[in-house]
Amino acid sequence: MACYDESKTNDNALVALALMTAKSLPEQKETVVALIVNMLVEE
């Protein structure tokens, strides 16, 4: 994994994503995590 000076997302966005994951229904959790991973992965 490369090291960058600037983060792709700020701390507030990461907190919001963590809360969204925590509040998601158990049957939706895998989908939510997959969406977040796809959003954070650099292509």
Image: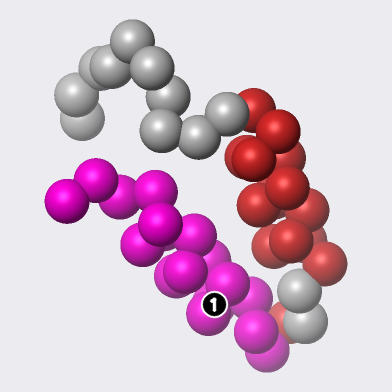
Residue furthest bottom as drawn: 27
* Colouring rule applied to residues: secondary structure
Name the element at disc 1. Answer: helix
Determine the residue positioned at 30% across, 50% down. 41
| Residue 11 located left or right of residue 6 | right
Up the image or down, 2 lies above or below 39; here it is above
Q: Which residue is mark 1?
A: 30
Determine the residue positioned at 78% across, 53% down. 19
Quarter occupied by the N terminus: top left
Displayed quadrant of residue 30: bottom right
Up the image or down, 22 lies above or below 13; here it is below
Q: Main secondary structure of the magenta part?
A: helix
Q: Which residues are magenta?
A: 27-43
Displayed quadrant of residue 21: bottom right
Q: Is residue 19 magenta?
A: no
Residue 24 position within the rendered picture, expressed as x and y whole percent measured from the top left: 76, 74
Residue 4 position within the rendered picture, expressed as x and y whole percent measured from the top left: 28, 16
Determine the residue positioned at 68% across, 89% down. 27
Residue 29 position within the rendered picture, expressed as x and y whole percent measured from the top left: 63, 76
Please tell me how crowded label 1 is: few (under 14), some (14-19), or many (20+) other residues with Cα within 10 Å.
few
| Residue 3 located left or right of residue 12 | left
Up the image or down, 3 lies above or below 22; here it is above
Residue 10 position within the rendered picture, expressed as x and y whole percent measured from the top left: 57, 29
